Image (cartoon, rainbow, N blue to C red):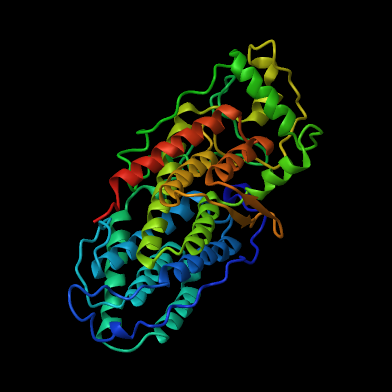
Amino acid sequence: MKSLRTLSGTVAIGISILALALGLTSCGGGYGGPTYAPADTNAPAEWSAIAVKAVLDASAVTPGGVSPMEESRAYAMAFVAAHDALNAIDRRYKPYLSDLQAPGANADAAVASAVSTVLKSALPSQAAALNVAYEAALARLPEGGAKTAGMALGRQTAQAILAARTGDGSAGAQGLYVPVQVPGAYQFTPPFDFAAFVNWGAVKPFAMESGRQFRTAAPFALTDPAYTADFNEVKSLGEAGSSARTADQTQIARFWLENTPMSWQRIAMTLATDKGLNGWDQMRLYALLQVAEADAYVASFEAKYFYGFWRPITAIRAAATDGNPDTTEDVAWTSLEPAPPTPDHASGHAAAAGAGAAVLESVFTGPVTFTHPSESLPGVTRSFVSIAQAEQEIGASRIYLGFHFRRAVSQGLKQGRQVGVWAMQHVMGPA
């Protein structure tokens, strides 16, 4: 089930957990009046890193790993809870769900309580480790009413988002899929004998109105010259033993096998540190980013199972049946890595790439350069001169892997951008 988690293996994450900021003694007895801004907090940076590590550790002990859909949902709930807690202390952005007022609460305690409470529910295998991290965070804070209030506030916002997401459809998202035996229809892809997350497109979105709100345009018809071009491209570049795929393209393919919500979260952390974002802005960024990621997967899976289009490996092996005289069958063709057991159109990886890029570009508007280390290709880093460059690489990687036709990638990127823009316009805006 490796391809469900899109990781080549769980490795130690290369993110150092940031130390909590000092100078929060003013929190012990309140903030001195309504015009006195609370001290800043580095807790969002620390708990973002803890969240990423918790997902990696959970993947190591979960059959098939933690899927990107489940990962983005967990992040979104945790970071939304922390965002709402911070904005109860000092209203800088609109709350997502919990419209509270707690101006004397300790911000560090509130973030730690909110994130740990959600993640222990979403990732129960990591409850013990999360408890250790939580107790260590609390031990660094001065005792008093502000700390106690922050702990209670974080639990309250966490419990509110967990209650709101109960019955959201994620628990029953696997579903049953019976392939239709006609050319162009999705068939189970080796080594799998099932289709995964059949009902994820019906999961309740965080910001969208429904999973079909941004449904992509259809795949190309099998006899369309554009389909022929896409067919020949992925047949050439995505084959396991391809001589047409360059060494750099092979690296890109495996570099971005990691879950896209994790990729963007780590990139967001890097950029937030480089640009000096304060704690409130960081927490809002992480919450908005993962709301968009989670909704991008809902939208993508709605399209996947609406169209039910075959994967390249099926199309290439069965090209003699597609009615297109310009496609050539290769019954032995196989992709660089096993494709996830879901339909081709649209690419979920690409949708998540587009959604994340839209959110990050809205926050980091000036020149942006960064280096990103891969979890799925340990020891390898790639450097980028823009967020869009990384977005395009993530999309192209799915062609180089042999997973998707270019139409699925381009439509996924477009869909993700639409989801990201919608999220930015409808949730957690300026107060």
In the image: residue 423, left or right of residue 15? left
Figure label count: 0
For image coordinates 69% across by 54% down, the residue present is: 377
Query: Which of these two is toward me, 17 or 294?
Result: 17
Residue 247 is situated, as x and y percent measured from the top left of the image, at: 78, 42
Q: Residue at x 27, y 64 (%)?
A: 87
Front residue of this view, candidates 157 and 363: 363
Locate residue 61: give its quadrant.
bottom right
Quarter of the figure with the C terminus: bottom left
From the viewer's perspective, is 142 left or right of 30?
right
Residue 318 left/right relative to 301: right
Query: x, y percentage for residue 45?
Result: 46, 68
Whether residue 78 is visible to the viewer of this picture, yes or no, is: no
Which residue does the image show at 53% across and 56% down from the upper left? 267
Residue 192: x, y in percent? 63, 41
Residue 360: in sight, yes or no? Answer: yes
What residue sits 60% from the left and 63% below the top?
A: 60
Q: Nearer the viewer, residue 222 or 167?
A: 222
Is residue 32 shown above or below 57? below
Q: Is residue 23 left or right of residue 186?
A: left
Tell me where residue 423 appears, x and y as whole percent: 35, 45
Q: Spot the residue most to the front.
A: 366
69, above or below 151, in the image:
above
